[in-house]
Image (spheres, rainbow, N blue to C red):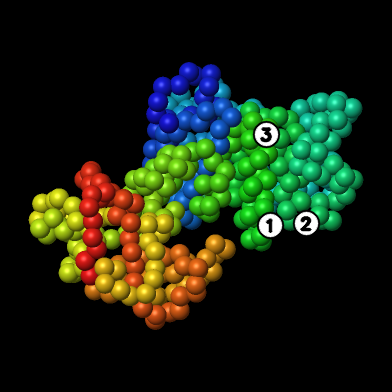
Amino acid sequence: MTAFRPVNDVAVSTAGVELHYGETPVLKGIDVSLSKGKTLALLGPSGCGKTTLLRLVAGLLAPTKGSISIAGQVVADAASGAFAPPEKRNLGMVFQDYALWPHLTVGGNVSFPLEMRGIGRADRKARTMRALERVGLQAYADRRPSDLSGGQQQRVAIARAIVAEPQLILFDEPLSNLDRELRENMVGELAELITSLGLTAIYVTHDHSEALTLADDVAVMRGGLIEQLASPDKLIASPATPEVADFLRLGGIADLECRDDLWFFKGSDVALLRHEGRTGNVVRVLIPTSAISAGEIAPGRLAATVLRSQFRGDGHLATVALVGPSNVELQVLSRAKLRAGEGVGLSIDPTQVHCFGNTVLSFNQEISQHA
Ligand SMILES: Nc1ncnc2c1ncn2[C@@H]1O[C@H](COP(=O)(O)OP(=O)(O)OP(=O)(O)O)[C@@H](O)[C@H]1O
């Protein structure tokens, strides 16, 4: 996102944006740049500042420091005091609670932004029906929102957000009120809609699978800062920090220490792999779930005990503790259900082990695991 890009290709950018509530900094310096036609997800735990950043872009808050531009125009600048209100930013917004007006029909809700822009009745009607058609609800124009399911109400909110063809759409946890199955279907539908309409979007969520499914780029936020901003593929292959890997649930985190070119789980005699290194060196690694296969306890495999297991659609995801090293928990995907307390033997593909920090270790040499 830092690469040079012609200004007219940039839909939104923020420079050094900070937001303080009194003395408390909530955003501590945010620099992002989003190209036209792309979707940026803001992902992170509760309280990390995602909604605050979205509200700043929307014009519902003004930054304490820094500036925000939309389509090359400065819409907020703390230094000069420049500030464009939401209605001047040409945005569509979709909220978690749909925010539909109960006294208006579905059609009335969708056409409202056009009325605000003073567009004539005939044009309004045609554009409203086109927006409803795009979300598959053209037959529902005369109904009240309360007659619709949660998923349908959210689609009405999306139709209302796109009806005036805004340059940018902001989504604030739009699916979090829906039940799991509907949410999973809607993520796919929404991704398709965003792509087919060529929308530029910022999408706030605390759900990593939603972010990785929908977005071209994901900003993983923590404590008012962006911890890493990258494409889903890059985030999965090279998480910048253990916190990012943990938040994306990519696998288990462990500290390894080097003794005689063997890398042991720290404080134990259990070695994960063989690789040149200086005795005493310690590195923190991610052992991805995809790198581990579980079977019977056998020589050459790492012994572990199952702590808990949960079915997740493509198998049973078990959390296991290694026998020997203290506090090393790994996640294993197994076809068979693994029961708490059961012993298992793990094989780990060392080429997938990811090392954090500046240390460059490629664990792709001749390896054997030493239990
Ligand atoms: N009006 C306010 N006054 C003071 N502090 C606030 C105010 N609004 C938000 N905060 C604080 O700012 C921080 C960031 O809030 P924000 O809503 O942006 O987080 P979030 O990442 O969107 O979380 P969530 O997923 O729970 O919505 C939180 O610690 C919150 O308590």
Identify which amino acid the numbered label 3 is placed on: Ser
Location of residue 215 in the rendering, given as x and y in whole percent from the top left corner:
54, 41
Is 62 in front, or is 235? 235
Q: Which mark is residue 182?
A: 1
Q: Quadrant of the N terminus?
A: top left
State the residue position of label 3: 196
- The secondary structure type at the circle numbered 3 is helix
Location of residue 42 in the rendering, given as x and y in whole percent from the top left corner:
50, 44
Is 230 in front, or is 70? 230
Q: Is residue 32 left or right of residue 300?
A: right
Instruction: Answer yes or no: disc 3 within 8 Å of ligand 1.
Output: no
Is disc 1 in contact with disc 3, using a CB cutoff of under 8 Å? no
What residue do we see at 76% from left, 51% from top?
152
What residue do we see at 38% from left, 53% from top?
245
Identify which amino acid the numbered label 2 is placed on: Ser
Q: Which mark is residue 149?
A: 2
Location of residue 101 in the rendering, given as x and y in whole percent from the top left corner:
78, 48
- 10 Å neighbourhood of mark 2: few (<14), some, or many (≥20)? few
Is disc 1 in contact with disc 2, using a CB cutoff of under 8 Å? yes
Instruction: Answer yes or no: disc 1 within 8 Å of ligand 1.
Output: no
- The secondary structure type at the circle numbered 2 is loop
Q: Quadrant of the C terminus?
A: bottom left
Asked whether the viewer can see residue 166, the reply is yes
Is 153 in front, or is 320? 320
- 10 Å neighbourhood of mark 3: few (<14), some, or many (≥20)? few
Identify which amino acid the numbered label 1 is placed on: Leu
